Image (spheres, rainbow, N blue to C red):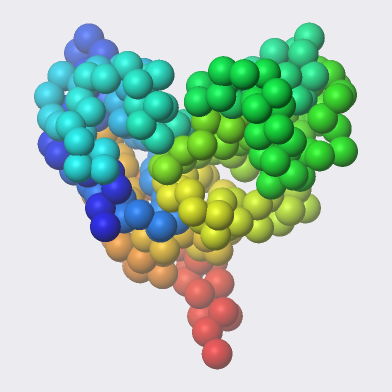
Amino acid sequence: MTLLQVKSLSHSFGGLKAVQGVSLSIQAGSLTALIGPNGAGKTTLFSLMSGFIKPDAGDIFFKGQAITGLAAFQCARLGLTRTFQIVQPFAAQTVRENICVGAYLNHPHREDAMQLAEKVASQVGLSGVLDQASAQLTVAGRKRLELARALATEPKLLLLDEVLAGLNPFEIQEMIPVIRGLVSAGVTVLMIEHVMQAVMSLAEYVWVLSQGQLIFEGTPANVSKDNKVIEAYLGQGMAQRMAQSVQGSEP
């Protein structure tokens, strides 16, 4: 079943065409990736999908319903939520209280929100720090908290904007099963990511954006073979390493 469908979406900032005629669809239960160079328009596309900015042209459908132009809180209530690359928790509040900010969207009673916060914290590995001030969290902890706040809105589709950025290799390896577990729990995931190791490990399907336009879509294994993607984003060295990684994982 198609959960999200984007048709000919465009948006400009003054004379800068950030997103140009982008069309894509997300299947329910999938874990897919949106990649591309810095400035390609990936985060702008997320903002358009999730209601943070309105498109100049094009249409967005979620669960078969037209949501073009809806505000972010309206999209979230329908089950479409995003995270942000630059995490900004409420530093004076505890981890539990931060997660409750998301939970209050659908659970206005404090006790219900608190119970959901505990469940979500367990899901992302924050159970042991629920009563700790969020300001005391490490970078990896803040990334998990950003994920938890979004999950507390109980999304059907979660847009992850570079949730692995700033993490070391060990922290990335710890986070990969957390992301994979979201799909097992019934959340469809579309992730923006520069960590190609994670893209190759997690994504079933990949879209590549460059200068606001889609230049490729297909399986992660085929990304490294596309000349346009190599020229615009990967470079020969990365493409070769990705190809070797795929070959090494084959029986």
Q: Viewer-proximal residue, 169 or 29?
A: 29
Residue 246 lies, in percent from the top left, at 50, 74
**Residue 214 in view (yes/no):** no
Residue 251 lies, in percent from the top left, at 55, 90
Q: Determine whether 162 is above or below 85 in the image.
A: below
Q: Residue at x 26, y 43 (%)?
A: 63
Q: Residue at x 20, y 36 (%)?
A: 65
Side (left or right) of 98 relative to 103: right
Q: Residue at x 22, y 19 (%)?
A: 69
Q: Give residue 197's quadrant in the image.
A: bottom right
Q: Determine whether 203 is above or below 175 in the image.
A: below
The N terminus, quarter of image: bottom left
Q: Hey, which residue is sitting farthest bottom in the picture?
A: 251
Q: Give residue 239's quadrant in the image.
A: bottom left
Side (left or right) of 90 relative to 216: right
Q: Viewer-proximal residue, 167 or 83?
A: 83
Q: Determine whether 31 is above or below 233 in the image.
A: below
Side (left or right) of 149 relative to 2: right
Q: How many marks?
A: 0
Q: Viewer-proximal residue, 45 or 110?
A: 110
Residue 102 lies, in percent from the top left, at 57, 24
**Residue 205 in view (yes/no):** yes
Q: Residue at x 82, y 30 (%)?
A: 130
Side (left or right) of 183 relative to 58: right
Q: Determine whether 9 is above or below 170 in the image.
A: above
